[in-house]
Image (tube, grey):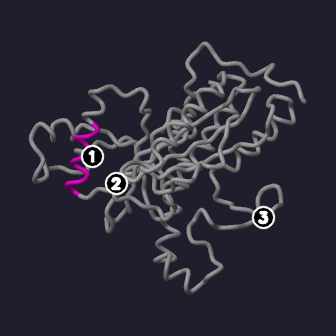
Amino acid sequence: MAETGSDIRPSARSTRLPADPAAAGGIIERAGRVARPRQRLGQLVPRRPEGITGNQWNAASRGLFDYVVSDPEGRSAPFAVEFVDASAQTAQTQRDDRMKHAVCDAVGLELLRIESATMQPATHGRRIVEYVIDARAFREATGDPAEYAELAPDAPRSYRDIVGRLPDGNSGHVNDLGAVARTIAVDAYVNRELVDPILRSLQLDWKDGPAEGWAWLQVRPGEYLFERVRIWQHRFSCGIEPGRLAEDLATMAVGERLRLRETVGLPLTGREQLADELDALRRRRDELTNPYAFDHVSFD
């Protein structure tokens, strides 16, 4: 077996990824849509909606969205995107979010909420927002997936399903957000930095909760680089199944950690802890719409 782990060690510093100024950018113009960063809810909803109390409105109107996407002419309703590190939230920020979401419900504002300790608006926001805009444009162009399937049975069902030529010359899913991460993992394995080059993942769809994606990569024997992403879609859809999108984002997050491994130490998780997470999933199987999604998974 190759020697591993000599150059990859957990950092004593913060494990948050550094912001990429080029990725953060400003206004995004893409596919006939404009995405504006850091928009307050009060800018979108100038008056307190019916059914919202004054206290709720005072808290919610100050709430920020990382991006608000609309068309330049205002002919279609906007949607918002927010990135949240749930582990860093306080009781107060959780209450503020509930107020903000109550207003979104009252006015029918579509919202995509991405919960991740790694995916940050300043580092990954532009890439993900552009991806979502493209996915919605594909859905608008092709219409209802069921009708589209009847007209073109062999055609892709969503933006994620489009098959084309990859950079390495092979054929594959060109809109797979996790593709780059898997390439980085193979390169790290070739450089004798990993014990296993295969980046594994799964998706979970909770009946009364978010879609959840897991992705993990064994760096040293019994020690894994593990990422979890949760997605909440409040009336929002981009034509890609939420669980599939969450899984791709978790895989992308592993790739981002690997890409910056020389400057930010990898936060590794032990096999025993991941096995406990898996046991907890088994106990909650009845709460999932895809209760057998993880039957093939083992950290033994």
Task: Answer above or below: position of 238 versus 88.
Answer: below
Circle 1: residue type: His
Question: At 42% from the left edge and 33% from the top edge, which residue is drawn?
Answer: 86
Q: Which mark is residue 234?
A: 2
- Which structural element holds mark 1? helix
Question: In the displayed structure, does residue 297 sit left or right of residue 77?
Answer: right
Circle 2: residue type: His
Instruction: Say if residue 159 shows up in the picture.
Output: yes
Residue 91 sits in which quadrant? top left
For marks 3 and 2, give the CA distance: 34 Å
For marks 3 and 1, give the CA distance: 41 Å
Q: Is residue 175 magenta?
A: no
Question: At 34% from the left edge and 54% from the top edge, which residue is drawn?
Answer: 234
Return the disc, 3 or 2, that comes first in the chain's sequence: 3
Residue 101 horizontal/vertical position (percent): 27, 46
Residue 87 sits in which quadrant? top left
- Which structural element holds mark 2? strand
Task: Answer above or below: position of 152 versus 10.
Answer: below
Residue at image mark 1? 101
Q: Which mark is residue 266?
A: none
Residue at image mark 3? 171
Question: Which residues, given as a range, are shown in magenta?
Answer: 97-107
Q: Nearer the viewer, residue 281 or 95?
A: 281
Q: Residues within 10 Å of mark 2 (few under 14, many from 20)?
A: some
Question: At 73% from the left edge and 67% from the top edge, which residue is drawn?
Answer: 164
Residue 163 horizontal/vertical position (percent): 69, 67
CB contact under 8 Å: marks 1 and 2: yes
Return the disc, 1 or 2, that comes first in the chain's sequence: 1
